[in-house]
Amino acid sequence: MTLGLVKHRLPPIWDGWRVKWDAFEDVTDIHICPPPRSRERCECGSVTPRRIARGWRQPKPGEMFESTRRKMGRRGKWVHIPAMVPAWPVVDLHAFRCGDCGDTEVWDTRTDEWWTLGPEDYGPDGSVRPVEREWTGGLFDLIPEPDPATRP
């Protein structure tokens, strides 16, 4: 994949969430806990160390979550009261790019899934989770569909 043909350096949207990406850095300069799975070399055969970029998943406009706030009570003690607070960006995406071929994998720490990016992920719609066939509760949903090439 040639990165010159894509509009974005990394997907601007991840599963419907806006993402701001940091610049790529050497992997040795960054500490991630727990450490990601190690892959000694890229599938292209390169032994060049991969570079990493962190992705900040942005909250949706007006997104809030329930928390507590402290307030001074009547008797001079702090009281915790429920409150809605604005959401903030969270780093939970890490992109690893081969220094030779440009192959990029993204580790989503929120779901602990790894994704290999393709050309379709770099467009304005970003990366979207593939739609899986849903189980509707019927018996025939559990039976795999026959391959038309092997039908008698």
Image (spheres, rainbow, N blue to C red):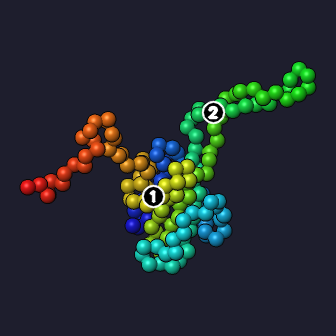
Q: Nearer the viewer, residue 122 or 92?
A: 92
Q: State the SS at label 2.
A: strand
Q: Amino acid at mark 2?
A: Phe
Q: Which mark is residue 65?
A: 2
Q: In terms of image quadrants, where is residue 59?
A: top right
In this picture, is 133 found above or below 29?
Answer: above
Mark 1 vs 2, N-terminal side? 2
For disc 2, the neighbor class at 10 Å (few under 14, some 14 to 19, many from 20) is few
Asked whether, in this view, residue 91 is left or right of residue 99, the answer is: right
For disc 1, the neighbor class at 10 Å (few under 14, some 14 to 19, many from 20) is few
Q: Which residue is mark 1?
A: 115
Asked whether, in this view, residue 20 is left or right of residue 76, the answer is: left
Q: Nearer the viewer, residue 39 or 9?
A: 39
Q: Is any part of residue 10 visible from this angle?
A: no
Q: Position of residue 85 (x, y in %)?
A: 68, 32
Q: Amino acid at mark 1?
A: Trp
Cα–Cα gap, marks 1 and 2: 28 Å
Q: Position of residue 132 (x, y in %)?
A: 35, 46
Instruction: Name which residue lies at 38% across and 59% down.
Output: 119
Q: Quadrant of the N terminus?
A: bottom left
Q: Position of residue 74 (x, y in %)?
A: 89, 20
Q: How many marks?
A: 2
Q: Is any part of residue 66 visible from this angle?
A: yes
Instruction: Name which residue lies at 62% across and 32% down.
Output: 64
Asked whether, in this view, residue 108 is left or right of residue 2, the answer is: right
Q: Nearer the viewer, residue 62 or 78?
A: 78
Instruction: Name which residue lies at 8% across and 55% down.
Output: 152
Q: State the SS at label 1.
A: strand
In this picture, is 96 found above or below 142?
Answer: below
Q: Which mark is residue 34?
A: none
Q: Position of residue 69 (x, y in %)?
A: 76, 31
